[in-house]
Amino acid sequence: MASERRGALITGASAGLGEAFARLLAAEGHDLMLVARRAERLQKLADELAAAHGIRVLVCPADLSKPSSALYLQHQAEAQNFQVDILINNAGLAEPVSFLNYPAEDVRAMIEVMVTGLTELSHRFGQGMAARGWGRIINVSSLAAFAPNSPGMLYTGIKSYVLNISQALDMQLKPSGVHVTALCPGFTWTEFHDTQGTREWANQLPAFAWQDAPTVVKAGWDAVSRGEPVCIPGVVNKAVASFTKHLPERLRYLFGKRARMVQ
């Protein structure tokens, strides 16, 4: 059990890393506010965790691609008298086709969920954490944040933004007792590749390149608890990040240009 009961808001909580975060934090005795679009799956998870751990679990179905979603979640937390001490910005999307072949509304949705929404949630709830003198924010970035870009791909640039803004927020908030960590996993066994239509390609990768969701989540939670601004779980992922981020920019561009371009 945790030394003190806190309230955690988790986006993208219906599956994958979000569900794994919910299970870990519930096991530590924290109350939960679960956010995702799939209300039925959220409710099933909420009922299970509340019964197993004797915690309070709120279900808040929401589409984070809507511009007003961060304000809506803040209002929901206030209306339910739910204090957010822990924020897990996990919700994410990835484009299955290249930039110019991706519908404009889907481009906007990606940016709204992973850039605007993440930033606004960190701002809205980070203020309260700083005022109270304690808080934990984990923003799920990716190993892709360290990689060369590839033709027409938004995901790498967005995840680089998440990495950078998380470090900037940690610099400002840490003196107030709030830790911010960018969690940068590599290939992780979740539903992500199924929803994006890349499962067949992903299954061709060697087994050593993969991690499971509970392992990634435990690494991220341990890192933010220690006050580490960046967490790259796994020895292989650390080696890849170290290699790619130190490449000269010209080589990074050339390597990225040779990457398989999605259509």
Image (spheres, rainbow, N blue to C red):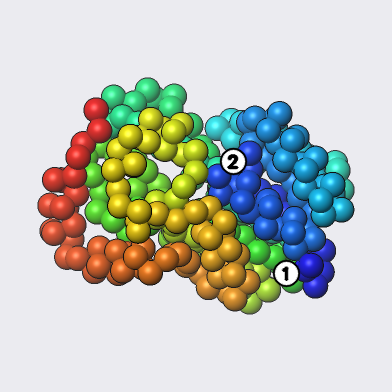
Check disc 1 and report its element: helix, strand or loop.
loop
The answer to whether one can see residue 161 in this image is no
Give the amino acid at mark 1: Trp
Check disc 2 and report its element: helix, strand or loop.
loop
Residue position for label 2: 15
Q: Dividing the image into 4 quarters, which one contains the C terminus? A: top left
Instruction: Give how far apart the Cα atoms at labels 1 and 2 are.
Output: 28 Å
Residue drawn at (19%, 65%) of the image? 247
The answer to whether one can see residue 8 in this image is yes
Give the percent coordinates (x, y) of residue 13: 63, 43
* Above or below: residue 88 compared with residue 243: above
Residue drawn at (63%, 39%) of the image? 14
* Above or below: residue 39 compared with residue 149: above
Q: Nearer the viewer, residue 89 or 53?
A: 53
Side (left or right) of 149 relative to 136: left
- Give the mark, 1 or 2, whose residue is nearer the N terminus: 2
Q: Quadrant of residue 202?
A: top left
Side (left or right) of 236 relative to 227: left
Neighbourhood count class around disc 1 (C-alpha, 10 Å): few under 14, some 14–19, many 20 upward: some
Give the amino acid at mark 2: Ala
Q: Nearer the viewer, residue 112 or 55?
A: 55
* Above or below: residue 135 compared with residue 196: below
Which label sits on residue 134?
1
Give the percent coordinates (x, y) of residue 183: 49, 60
